[in-house]
Structure formats: C-alpha cells, structure tokens
Amino acid sequence: MARLQHKAVKLGLERVLVEQVNLLKGLRVGLVCNPASVNHRFQHAADLFHENLNINLTTLFGPQHGIRGDVQDNMIETSHIIDSQTKIPIYSLYSETRQPTEEMLSGIDALVFDLQDVGCRVYTFIYTMANCMRACTEYGKKMFVLDRPNPINGVDIEGNLLEIGHESFVGMYPIPMRHGLTVGELAQLFNTNFELHCELEIITMNGWSREDYYDETDAPWAMPSPNMPTVDSAVVFPATVYFEGTQISEGRGTTRPFEIIGAPYINAQEYADALTSLELSGVIYRPINFLPTFQKFANENCGGVFLHVTDREVFEPVITGLAMIKTIFDLYPNDFKWKNPPYEYVYDRNPFDVIAGTTKIREFFEQKRGIQKIKNSWQKDLKEFYKTREQYLLY
C-alpha cells in the first residue's frame, strides 16, 4: 500500500541549528523548551543545543508540565532542578514566578523559545513566551522564537476576543479563542500591538502553508502537554477546553482527553440526540459511557459523547463547545454546576469566565439566550482582529 504523502516542513529549530547557528555563536544561551521541542528525528532541543559545539547552552527554562513533561495537571507548582540529561539547571516558569527573574537570566545573553502551541488562546505556553519577552526587555537580553506550525491551521479564527479586565495566565491579551497564528506570528503581535518592545528575532519555518493542519505535514508530533496526545485532540481543544470551567469531565483520566465529555448524571443517548438536533457542521456526537481514572469523577461511570470531527473545513470548534455546554445546562439544570475557583492561579473569578475571557457567555446561558446570539456577539471584533493579524503573518 502506498504511503500517504505529507508536505515537507523544516522547523525553526532545525533551521537555527543548521542554517543560522551563527546567530547564537559567542552568546550564552538560555532555552525554553518542553517534550514537544523536537526535530524530525524526535531529538530534544535541549540535547541538540547541548551537543552543538557552536552553542553555549547555560540555562534551561520549563513551562507548565516541565521540559521533559513530568508534571501532569493544572495548578501544580514545579520546582527549579538540574536536568538529568544535560546536567544544566532548569528554572520553572510555572512556579512561584511565571516570568524569568533577573537572577535566572544573569547567565545568558539570549533566550531561545521553542514550544509547540495548539492554536488556542487558553494554552499557557504563549504567555510563557510573552513573559519571557517582557523579561528580555527589562534585563537587556535578545529573544529568539523558533517557529512551529499552528496544528489546527493558520487560516481560521473563531470566538470572542478576551475583554480588558479579564486577563489571566490563560488569556493575557485581546485575541480570539482560535487565533490562527503561529508562535512566531503571535510573538510579533505581542511585541508590537501589546508593546513588549523586546529585541526579537523569529526563525521561520520552510514549507508550512497557512491552510495546513499539522498531520498534513511531515512535522514530528510529540505531545506538547500530557492531555494533548494527538492532533485530533488539538482540533477539538478550542471547543472542549471550556468544560474545564464546569463540573463536567473534559475527558482527563481517559485515553482521549478533550474528545470525551460527560458526567454521571448525563444520559448519553439523550445528550447525543440533543446535540445532533442542533445541526452544527463537521461533527458527529457518539454516545458513550466512560470511567475516568483521575480528576473529575474519578472511578465514576459517566455518560456523555465522543466528538468525532468528520470535516475539519466546516467544523467550528468554539461555537460547538459552547453549544455542548449550553445543551447540558438546559437538559440538566438541577445537576449542572460551574467549577469553583481557583483556576490557573485565579482565585476570585468564575473559572468559566476566566477561560471565556468574559462574563457575557455565561450570562447568555443563564439568560437562556440562543447559541446564534452568542456567535453573533463576537463577529464585529473578529473582523477587526483579521485586519490586525494581517500585519504579522509570516507565511
């Protein structure tokens, strides 16, 4: 059987090591990386930098879940340790500080960022990047961003823009839930529009096109976080991440987090039928029962659905996810509950509002307003964002 052909992509990591290593020559280098910071041979960026005779790697920085992916869940403060492989110190940027301190940066001249984003506003890695840029400005360091694909394409955008006053570590800036940018493009947007004023250089990819989903390329997929096992997980993430703000399982503790949704009080067939009746495009809801092994409803039988995306081109994850929550809200009003704080270090706000970047969506649910009104509410802001993002597109 013939092998499926995938578009060849050269990552920013590979380009800086082979074509542009002179940019780092003579500098003391810090590297922000995690388990998905790999090349096509699945070799880790920390090891590649450490072994390269032209690079003086002095310091490593880990985002949420650590540089080797050893920390599972939200709200866990990781410590500063020595990397077992390279013997280089690792500073956690998901601990008592989420921005590098002057002391952490004292042994470097340049900071290199190589993390895989998933194309969604609430993924913390892009704010680790913003915090690093801010620190580089403050302490006079140069910042390099090694670009990687947006796994859910760089064309489609969807959802409300985060409102001023709703900032958190899962939403620092007014961008939509599905932003349609690569990390390099986001870095440029953050630097200029949100005035970080960092000395910034983007090492672009070769071969990636905006319409490409990750699995349409030959780029190596390694889990960027423990609950993001596949590209399919990333495709539905802008839909089902909203469930983190509820007392409904988003599938953590199963083998397919974010594709499996449910709770003990949900009748799987009733829920699937109600969702199907909405006639949202590109998705089928398969009724299932499942038993999470940890997190919400651990070892309890849950009814719910498995999200099967049948056509990515017409699937709209954000409105689909909100419709899924609204359907449970309407079907099971005596059982449905919002999650209690804290969420991502925010202690004084409804976690759903933190994720949504606004109180308006929750209020729409509580006022029994239709899902189309929610979708209509963000169209004007999306048009403005389209214009803004055009200035920062690299591909």
Image (cartoon, helix red, strand yellow):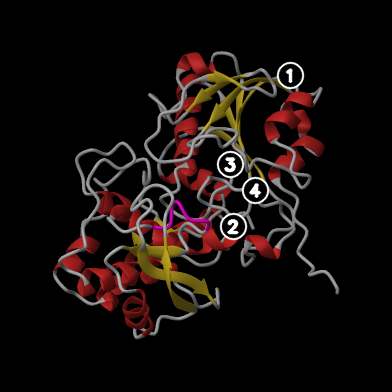
Q: Taking 268 as reference, is 69 left or right? A: right
Q: Residue furthest right?
A: 1
Element on which disc 4 rests = loop
Camera sees residue 344: yes
Q: Which residue is mark 1?
A: 26
Q: Which residues are magenta?
A: 250-255
Q: Which image quarter holds the N terminus?
A: bottom right
Q: Look at discs 4 and 3 and give the one toward the viewer.
A: 4
Residue placed at 43% from the left, 60% from the top?
Answer: 238
Q: Which residue is mark 2?
A: 230
- CA gap, disc 1 to disc 2? 38 Å
Mark 1 / mark 2, whichever is N-terminal:
1
Identity, as a three-letter code, of the amino acid under mark 1: Gly
Residue 237 drawn above or below residue 308? above
Camera sees residue 357: no
Residue 218, position as x, y percentages in the image: 75, 58
Q: Which residue is mark 3?
A: 115
Q: Taking 160 as reference, is 394 left or right? A: right
